[in-house]
Structure formats: C-alpha cells, structure tokens
Image (cartoon, grey):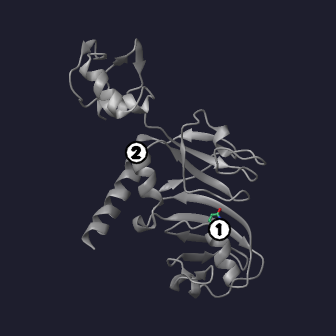
Amino acid sequence: MRLIDIFVLNKCGSKKQAKKAIKKGLIQVNNKIVDEDIDITDETVIYDSKILDSHPLKYYIIHKPSGYVCANKDPHDPCLITLLPDENLHYVGRLDRDTTGLVILTNDLKLRKRLTLPEFHIPRTYAFTCLNPLKDITPFKEGITIDGDVKCLPAIVEMTSEYEGIITLEEGRYHEIKKMFLSLNNKITSLHRIMYGDISLGDLESGTYRILTQEEINHLKDITRRSLCNISKK
Ligand code: URA
C-alpha cells in the first residue's frame, strides 16, 4: 500500500496533507525521513511521534442476529456495527432487521463497491422458509419482476422441502427476496444469509465476528478482478 494511503487510513489527514507532511520531512519509514510517496509492506511508519498501522485495511465477517440493523445510527434498533471493535467500517450488502446471517464489513471501499455492484455478479446465498409451498421455481430462473417494473437478475433456487430452500442472487436490491416471493403470492417467513462470494458463515455463532483470513480476502479480490475483466470485454 502507498504511504499516502496509510497516512489517510490512519486518520492523520487528507491526501493533500499527506503530501505536505512528506515534503516537510515529517514522516519516517524504518527511522529514515522519506521525501516521496513509496510502497509500504511491513515497514515501520512514524508520523507525529506515532507509529502508524501499516495494514490499515480491515475485513470482518459477523453473524448478524435478528433485531439488529445494518446502519451506523438508528433511533429504535441496535446497530450491527456496535458489535465490532472498529466503528470506521462499511457494510458490504445490508440485511433487513429480521434477516440473520453473514455480513462482511470493511474500510476497503474499492473492494466493497465491487462486491456490491450488480455488474460484478457476486453470488449471495440465503436459506429461506416461505409461508406457502413453492412448487414452481421457473420464475426465479427467468427473473422475477418486483416493484411493478423492476426485473431482477435470474436467481438459482433449490428446494429442500415444500417450504424451505436455498436461493442464490447476484445482486442485492432492497428487500429483493421478500419482494420476489410477494410477486409470486407467497411470503418469506425466515431468511438467513449463509454465503457471500466464496465466504461462508460456517459455525460462527450469532452475534460474534472474526477477521477474514488473508486467503479469503485474496479470494474476494480475485473474483471481483475476474468480473471486472468480463465487464471490460463487453
Ligand atoms: N433480500 C431481502 O428481502 N432481505 C434481505 O435481508 C436480504 C435479501
């Protein structure tokens, strides 16, 4: 990561202020004053007598309990972010208040954007229960229309019983799954996200979080890079 980005992500100031600090010789890397923006891997960066975090990009996965909202502030309900050790994070694909399961949070805004934009086709998988038996899953393959005129991308549905199944979407519109079922005169009674890309919730307990492994982060970056290649070919 570039020195300037480390300065900004450590909340030392803006990019402009980082450039000025470098020019004035106020930043040391491995105890030597630097005079330009350089790549940092594991070096010790000091600014204003403070050692900066040279790995400031953070990636977490949390098991969202029901009743929490994916917001930073809410007048009525507890915010999911309060269960994490760092409040400077952004949700990667929000879940409804009553939906449970996997949520990724990060301050890597470039990756977050790529993981959420529908053009990137990142799969998100949910276990669901519905009110009425679901016999015909063909409308999901064709793309269901919600909100009167919004055609959803095709979704994959596998039923495990008449009322329960697994659904995979490649986009994340507001209340999308609930609205798809309403369009079919059915109703979602429970929704639980189990995967995002290749990241799986596994046996992470409700209300707890963990840091993503380097392998998982690399995987997320890889799938978004592959999608980006497909987008540029179109
Ligand atoms: N679709 C929904 O309807 N709700 C969610 O929380 C996620 C996907």
| Left or right of residue 21: residue 171 | right
Classify 10 Å Cα crowding around label 1: few (below 14), some (14-19), many (20 and above): few
Side of 124 where 192 appears, left or right? right
Quadrant position of ligand 1: bottom right
Secondary structure category for the residue under label 2:
helix
Q: CA distance from mark 1 to mark 2?
A: 31 Å
Q: Quadrant of residue 8?
A: top left
Q: Is residue 204 left or right of residue 121?
A: right
What residue lies at 68% left-to-right and 85% top-to-bottom? Answer: 184
In the displayed structure, 149 sits above or below 129; it is below
Look at label 2 and name its amino acid.
Glu
Rendered position, 25 above or below 231? above
The C terminus is located in which quarter? bottom left
Can residue 165 be seen in the rendering of this structure?
A: no
Residue 45 location in percent, x, y? 34, 20
Which quarter of the rendering shows the N terminus? top left
Q: Indicate if the residue with disc 1 has its beta carbon within 8 Å of ligand 1.
A: yes
Give the left or right position of residue 228, taking residue 10 as reference.
left
According to the picture, the residue beneath numbered tag 1 turns out to be 175
Q: Give percent across and percent down for residue 158.
A: 59, 76
